[in-house]
Amino acid sequence: MLSALPGVLFDGVAYGSLLFLISIGLSVTLGLMNFINLAHGAFAMVGGYACVVATLRYGLPFGVALVVAFAVAAIAGGVLERVLYRRLYGRSPLDQVLFTIGLTFMSIAAATWVFGSGQQPVRLPDTLLGQTRILGVDVGIYRLFLIAIVFALASGLALLVTRTRFGARIRASVDDARTAAGLGIDVERVFSVTFTLGSGLAGLGGALGIDVLGLDPTFPLKYMVYFLLVVVVGGAGTIVGTLCAAMVLGIFDVAGKYYVPWAGAFVIYALMVALLLLFPRGLLRRIR
Amino acid sequence: MSVAFSLPDARWRAAEIAFWIATGLVFFVFPSHLVLASQVLITGLFAVSLDLVLGYAGIVSLGHAAMFGTGAYVAGILARNGWGEPLSGLFAAGLAAAAVAFVTSFLALRGEDLTRLMVTLGISLLLYEAANQAGVWTGGVDGLSDMQVRDLFGVFPFDIRGRTAYLYTLAVVFLVFCAARRVVHSPFGLSLRGIRESPRRMAAIGSPVQRRLVVVYTLAGAMAGIAGALLAQTTQFVGLEVLGFSRSADLLIMLVLGGAGWLYGGLVGAALFLVAQSLLSRLNPVYWEFWLGLLIVLVVLLARGGINGALTRVSARLGLARRQA
Amino acid sequence: MTAALRTQGLSRSFGALKAVREVSFTLEPGARHALIGPNGAGKTTFVNLLTGALPPSSGAVYLGADEITGLAQHERVKRGMTRTFQITTLFPGLTVLESVVLAIFERKGIAASLQTRVANRTAEIHEAIHIIRELRLERDAGSVTRSLPYGKQRLVEIAVALATRPRILLLDEPAAGIPAAESGEVFGVIAALPREVSVLFIEHDMDLVFRFAERITVLAQGSILAEGTPQEIGADPRVREVYLGDEAARG
């Protein structure tokens, strides 16, 4: 049993990387505008379908398809933010929850109508298939690739947030939107851009995740809890917190399914309630 | 200035009496749709229980199905194991659901709105998984069937056309509704509305806010459990979806469409929702989901002052809830 | 004679900031006591410590002879201490009558009752109407609070507080945000309260303070700078300095 531990950890980290990639946008929107976006998973789904269409219908290489997935999801997020989401800032949580549940339902129905209700296949390039041995552990090359990409992106994001002017604006706005606005920061614009970027990253995560998470129209609902959980546990608006939470969740979920398969998803939900109890005020206010 | 002018009057209004007579007439007018009609009443009762929590006390819950499902499974498991007497089954289910609500209320009512949403959702998902894993008792994904529900009062069998089921459901729903109505018109009901309007001020006038919320959450839990038990007994089946996220989300939508904060909204919303669903799903279930989503999005976007604002106005106009000068 | 309300070395810090430090303060029975001080002096924090909305970092609060430092807010209200808020904190969707009746229910301990109906509680309703009349709000009794002009809402604020029948009333800028002409009216109502009620109020308008207060405490940077009758405070050079310095800094 223990001999499987390194493999389980590795799979958990790969899974956690995906959760991070998809959730980071949600974390920032929640931290910035206190907006509860239950429809966030829909942007990941959009990216997933964009990748499928790009590779299977237009025969584009996988790498290009990932860029397409990012772009399509980012555009979808940017447009929706401008047209719809913007009107809901500052409204009650009930309004936000209902509104985003409505969007989720629409996205599920639309995806079913266009692509059917089945699981979508993904064709990975041959170089990413197969296994390799690292430190005596057999690991899937694709998962290795995935972890590498996500860690590169996370570092990039951390640099963006800590080193650039735009990053400084994001941090100021997360800290206190009113004060930031008082300092002359265009908080709405900061939010538009981060929302777009976050949606794009979710789309990229959806595309990279087809092989791990699967892709069908119920995707936004199936993983909604996971994304929300990452954000609530990690603390909204922080990259490091979100990354840690995603890893903890990914590892626990994979390990739970491997070691106590009869408990199913019980492990993860129990973990969620326990974490929320340990930090009852919601971790939102804890970090920073 | 008369005293009654600005206080909610507990007397039954003509519109209310007409409403309940109409539900009785359904039995004669739509004899072939009694199964759907029973579903409407049961779901309506479930929505009324959420209304106490959301519309009156102002707590947004994404996991109200936890109590509904508990009630359904308790009634189902009892009926399957030789305790098929419906009324005592209903009672046991209500108690069990109240117990679940009471225990979880200490978790669910802490923190702020987002934490509450997550915790209520998490609790219902936990129960879902528990029911999924406890296949010996619950039948797991296959659901719980072979229930032996005995004749009502030992006299009226539950017939295939759902005649007994409808009248039984109507009677139970009406009685529980009366209880909810009583709660709303009591000093306790007024204090719930105070909490919804401003928990801070309630604390400042000496109200133990948290304790009140535990009480209403438990009461609403019992009602939801009774609704779940009714579903189990009248359909003689309990599926995992009684605990699912969709049940909680759909419920929230129904309540909002019917209007939260005046009790009848739950019943009206459930009727609109289920009738539309049964008509539109016949065309194509996917379309139904799409139009439903669009409808909610539009309602939220177009309602002046958000859902809450719109509801206050509607209920005031109907004169059924609080009367406003 | 025991003080109505007393604090002993009461302090509260927020991180490195010491908002209230070592305040030992006494409110005499029947007092009309003003708490003044420049912005950021810690007045509202001090009131929050008195009501239990915030726990103190150290020190103690006594109500009469009893220590109440550890009591929850609603328990302090039960013992006769009620506050109003600087920023109007009411029940926007309830009518004025409903708001006042609700506060009376809470005081009488029947607000958790499922036995009776609100509309049948004539005793409480009559009492509410009496309070509403005292504040000259009878024309608005049936109006939803949200729909009232701001000045009226300040009066509702006081009506709700009075309905808890406090022995001690803490008023955080009761006339904030209403026109000067009407603020005198608000204080007139406060001055006319029976002497069983001890009143502590925070107020910025010095005219009102010197007109209505019988005793004044000046808070600066979290501690008591001076305390005395209006004459004494008016003549105190330190108080002048704090206020003039504050004016200069603002200007």
Image (tube, coloured by chain):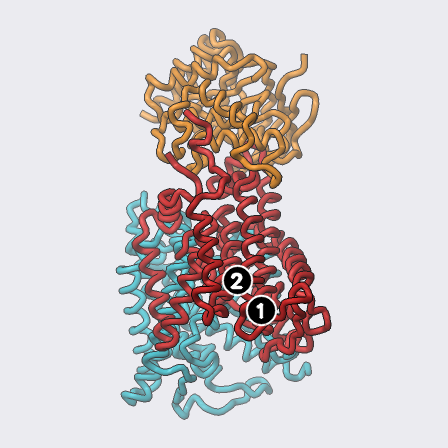
Chain colours: A cyan, B red, C orange
Residue at mark 2: B42
* The one of C177 and B260 positioned closer to us in this rendering: B260
Please state the total of marks drawn on the protein image: 2
Q: Position of residue A283 (x, y in %)?
A: 52, 55
Q: Quadrant of residue B129?
A: bottom right
**Residue at horizontal 66 percent and vertical 67 percent from the top:** B155
Q: Is A235 situated left or right of B144 in this image?
A: left
Q: Same subunit under labels 1 and 2?
A: yes
Type of amino acid at the residue the image marks with label 1: Thr
**Residue at horizontal 34 percent and vertical 74 percent from the top:** B287
Q: Position of residue C89 (x, y in %)?
A: 45, 34
Q: Is label 1 in a helix, a strand or a loop?
A: helix
Q: Using the rendered image of the protein, determine whether residue A48 is visible from the camera's viewpoint.
A: yes
Residue at mark 1: B234
**Residue at horizontal 40 percent and vertical 69 percent from the top:** B277
Instruction: Kindly indicate whether the residue at mark 2 contacts the one at mark 1 (C-beta within 8 angstroms).
Output: yes
Q: Quadrant of residue C124?
A: top right
Q: Using the rendered image of the protein, determine whether residue A204 is visible from the camera's viewpoint.
A: no
